[in-house]
Amino acid sequence: MRIEFIAQAGVKIHTAHGSILCDPWFNPAYFASWFPYPRNDTLDHAALGATDYLYISHLHRDHFDPEWLAAYCNKDAVVILPAYPLPELKEALEGLGFRSFIETQSGVPVRHGGLLFVVEALTAPTDGPIGDSALLVDDGVERLLNLNDSRPTDPDRLLVQGPIDICLLQFSGAIWYPMVYEMPAKAAEALAKKKRSAQFTRAARYAEIIAPRVVIPSAGPPCFLDDDLFRWNDVNNAEDSIFPDQRFMVERLNAEGQAAVLMLPGSVGEFTASGEFKVHHPQGELSVQSVFADKEVYLRRYAADMAPRIAAEKARWLGPRTHLLPELKAWLEPLMALGPRVCDGIGTTVKIQTDDEAILLDFPERSVVADDGREVEFRFAIPRPLLDHLVRTRTDDWVNSLFLSMRFTAWRKGAYNDYVYTWFKCLSPARIQYAEGFYAENGPSEGTFDLSGWQVQRRCPHMKADLTRFGTTDGDTLTCSIHGWQWDLATGRCLTSDGHPLFSRPQSEQAKSVAAEAAQKVPPGPDATAGAPDGA
């Protein structure tokens, strides 16, 4: 197994049974705030794109680069697809021309073409942009575990195929906290030091549990080439930077007895016959010396080269001003109605402040109103051109676009509230319904309800919509109006897709007659009436 490093979480794995391209990232992300570090634009794009398999861990734009994939990646590559509850990743890749998919089940080994793959999918609303994943590759000789950004809660599950030889491990920050928060400088410095220490400790703990033969620190850091953001680069190896480079993690792991190596864009590494993991670095602009000898000089030169890209991105935001209050009201109030758990979890009012206007998101009242001077517990200040762009384009995930860009400021009165950030990454009906269903499944059970003579599970098996609000029936068939999915009430069988059985039990005499007639035709499968949801 030979490892060719690309940048960030990007890596190409070469085996005797084919190559696997993982998370190739080249183009700026998050409103041209993030760039690959070190730069990788001089690599051989065509050679990298000539791959047998493609794995995109999740939809973060420093992992999913649609512009590059469209231009360079082999569309006949077999895509290793994580088992996400929403089809957004698959649909995005299909839109780029990919046609062949291995649709995995989380934690379940899949053999294909001499290789064994295991994808561990994380599916909480807080995991990435609705999902994150890790990939295990076994070529029959060595096993590689690519954690990218994921943080599996049970990493022992990833060891069931045997010991790990190579682990790619995130160590650097991928967050906007505390940098964008309005707080005293000393407080921000102390919090950043704490954050840096925590992320190193987390990475070291994963390395301790997984115990690979070698760790490759990856999935960070990005660099910030816009003059407005350049200060966030760790050019002076500061203790309060949450974006340290790979050298610091390598030093820590080696000091703790864990073998770790530094890899740069273009570096190639593999185990020798003697068991040593040997890395060959590129020379010239991508050499270790040129990148790290004077980081600020390196980054300033990189910034000058990328200035036209940044200017073009900023020009793309410009457009007609939106009528913020009516447009946000029309967009967000229906989502509030679909997301009572999220709204109740927020339980307060959030202010959206821009250059000349302020809007309040009143979650207890499920309303969007003009600022009336009331006290709030959360405030986000967003430049007007960028806010207009978000509204015009109906960007459904502000967390993994605006927030990661750090092109805003934030303030909060109390503690961190996870529901606030779930809300801002779920600004579409499908996403908010998924979050509601997740919280429903992982919170108090809601049992069943009566629907025209049938006792039916309350939550839709597809996207967990509340069927007391969105379920209708003609007597034989239940239809969920959110996505139009349908079920045969007599058998519980989904008529729209394989799987997704519905619990239903006849209560009225008419319903019992329908169920009896159906039973004479086709006996119900084991999933159809396997048991009511908890609490029924």
Image (tube, grey):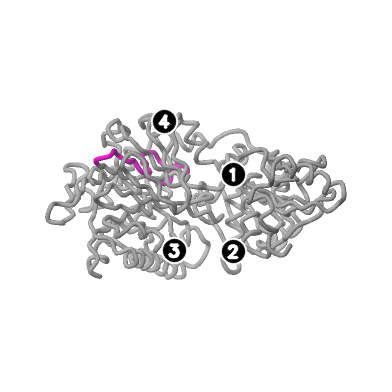
Whether residue 50 is visible: yes
Q: Are marks 3 and 1 in contact (CB under 8 Å)?
A: no
- Secondary structure found at label 3: loop
Question: What x and y, as percent, mark residue 324?
Answer: 68, 43
Is 22 contained in the magenta span?
yes
Q: First in sequence, mark 4 or 1: give its number.
A: 4
Q: Residue at x 34, y 40 (%)?
A: 21
The picture quadrant where one finds residue 530 is bottom right
Mark 1 vs mark 2, CA separation in Å: 19 Å
Check whether the beta carbons of the residues at disc 3 and disc 4 lie within 8 A of each other.
no
Q: CA distance from mark 2 to mark 4?
A: 38 Å
Residue bearing mark 1: 396
The amino acid sitting under disc 3 is: Asp
Front in this rendered view, residue 510 or 261: 510
First reached walking from the N terminus: tag 3 or tag 1:
3
Residues tagged 4 and 1 counted as in contact (Cβ below 8 A): no
Left or right for 461, reference 406? right
Residue behind mark 4: 70
Residue at numbered disc 3: 154
Instruction: Determine the residue positioned at 64% across, 46% down.
Output: 462
Marks 3/1: CA–CA distance: 30 Å
- Asked whether the beta carbons under mark 3 and mark 2 sit within 8 Å of each other, the answer is no
In the rendered structure, which disc, 3 or 4, sits on the residue that comes first in sequence? 4
* Mark with earlier residue (2, 4): 4
Image: magenta residue range: 16-35
Tag 1 and tag 2, C-beta contact below 8 Å: no
Find the residue positioned furthest to the right.
509
The location of residue 185, given as percent across then percent down, is: 45, 66
Name the secondary structure under disc 4.
Answer: helix
